[in-house]
Image: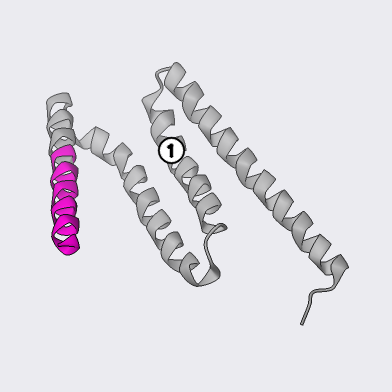
Amino acid sequence: MPIDPSVSEQLRGFERRRRKLLQAAIDAETTAVALATKQKDIHQVISRSPALVECLGGQIAVMVPAQARASVLSVIAEAVMHVKGAATQMVMYAENEANDALLQMQTCAINANTSLEKYEALSKE
């Protein structure tokens, strides 16, 4: 059944406003993180970063089909939890321990990427 033209226009208007809201939220959080970075306020950078991830995730979530949205939102929520964990990590570790933890996590990411690349290469054969 076709959508009534006035309903269709209302839906387009809603979508435009939603896009503008999400963009404004992303801009606001990006600006807050940038200002905190400029002021060398690591606590503000850490505390504002989860909101930026949530805003970016919201932008992605509205772009995917409804049946995939729950999975996307789950990934976003997990990413936000990890970003929020940065504050705890920074108080748990001394400077050298934090650097070691960073190096270990970067190595894990590199190894995971290498493993994926090998798997993809093998699956193409």
Q: Does 2 lie within the magenta span?
A: no
Which residue: 59% across, 34% down?
28
Which residue: 53% across, 46% down?
55
Q: Front-most of 60 and 50?
A: 60
Which residue: 26% across, 33% down?
90
> Quick check: 56 above or below 34?
below
Q: Residue 84 at x, y = what percent?
A: 36, 44
User: Is residue 77 left or right of 25 when viewed as pictured?
Assistant: left
Look at mark 1 in the image and give the residue it sits on. 49
> Quick check: 5 above or below 105?
below
User: Is residue 19 left or right of 125 when viewed as pictured?
Assistant: right
Q: Residue 96 at x, y = what percent?
A: 12, 26
Which residue: 76% across, 58% down?
12
- Name the image colouring: one colour
Q: Does 122 lie within the magenta span?
A: yes
Q: Front-most of 124 and 48?
A: 124
Q: Residue 20 at x, y = what percent?
A: 68, 44
Which structural element holds mark 1? helix
Point out the stretch of residues depicted in magenta. 106-125
